[in-house]
Amino acid sequence: MATTSGIGNNVTTTINDSLKSTATTSLADNFTTFLQLLTTQLKNQNPLDPLDTNQFTQQLVQFAQVEQQLKGNDQLASLVTLQQSAQSTQALGFVGHIVALDGETSRLENGSAGWSFNSSKPATATINILNSVGATVYSGTFSLNAGVQNFVWDGRNTSGVMQPDGDYKMSITAKDATGQTVAVATEVQGVVDSVDVSKTPPVLNVAGKDYTLDKIKRVVRYVAPTPEPEPETPETEAPAS
């Protein structure tokens, strides 16, 4: 009899160890193991020394908690799927729109590259523009106002030499009237050319670079230019017969 009772105690210990081993086994595996061990324990308990009622109740509570957690995980998985679908739908709505995004790199094309930046207070700033290899091609000192403002670079370096098209990075160091450093956040603007919804989260492609939705600061609807009316052709009268 003592051996049978020992089996019951060992099974109880195994159940508790199994429920705590989530680091190495999945929750679903633990759930199945719990059922198997609980059934084995009921079959092998000593009739003269049955499992304590309080201990059995605790195991049933653990059983219910595991079951609820499994159901909760299924519901969370459904919510995650819905959230991903909503993100994809939201991202597709940006195609063709002009967006301002957190970023430092803008593309120089046709002698123009643009940035936006946001200063918390009026400041004097040194603006450096670096090429793709990290060399400074342009540097200048400017007065900044508080708020969002735009900066358009004509593509010429400090010596006035036109630079080739490509990606250029802006670096700003700003100080206020008392000499204290002012943080200036840089932004880039561009048209969203495409959206890749196969990635999680979806990414927007702007000027050949990918950005996640959390990088968007502002959205401007693109308005196509209105075509100019064609000049009217003057009517000519047929010659009199």
Image (cartoon, rainbow, N blue to C red):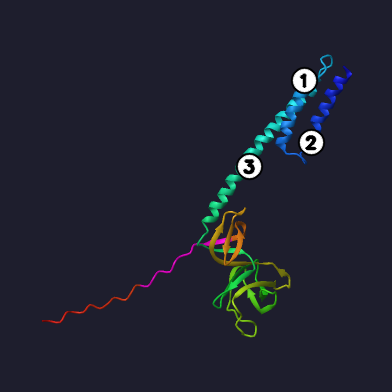
Three-letter amino acid code at disc 1? Lys
Q: How crowded is mark 2: few (under 14 residues within 10 Å), some or many (20 or more)?
A: few
Nearer the observer: mark 3 or 1; the answer is 1
Picture disc at residue 43: 1
- State the image coordinates of residue 110 (x, y, percent, origin top left): 54, 77
Residue farthest left in this picture: 241
Callout 2 secondary element: loop
Picture disc at residue 20: 2
Q: Is 216 located above or below residue 124 in the figure?
A: above
Residue identified by numbered label 3:
77
Mark 2 or mark 3: whose residue is earlier in sequence: 2
Q: What stretch is highlighted in magenta?
A: 217-228
Residue farthest right in this picture: 2
Asked if marks 1 and 2 touch (Cβ < 8 Å), the reply is: no
Three-letter amino acid code at disc 2? Lys
Mark 1 or mark 2: whose residue is earlier in sequence: 2
- State the image coordinates of residue 31 (x, y, percent, origin top left): 72, 32
Asked if marks 2 and 3 touch (Cβ < 8 Å), the reply is: no
Toward which corner of the image does residue 20 lie, by quadrant? top right
Which quadrant holds the C terminus?
bottom left
Q: Residues within 10 Å of mark 3 (few under 14, many from 20)?
A: few
Q: How far is the residue under mark 2 from the one under mark 3?
A: 23 Å
Q: How far is the residue under mark 1 from the one under mark 2?
A: 23 Å
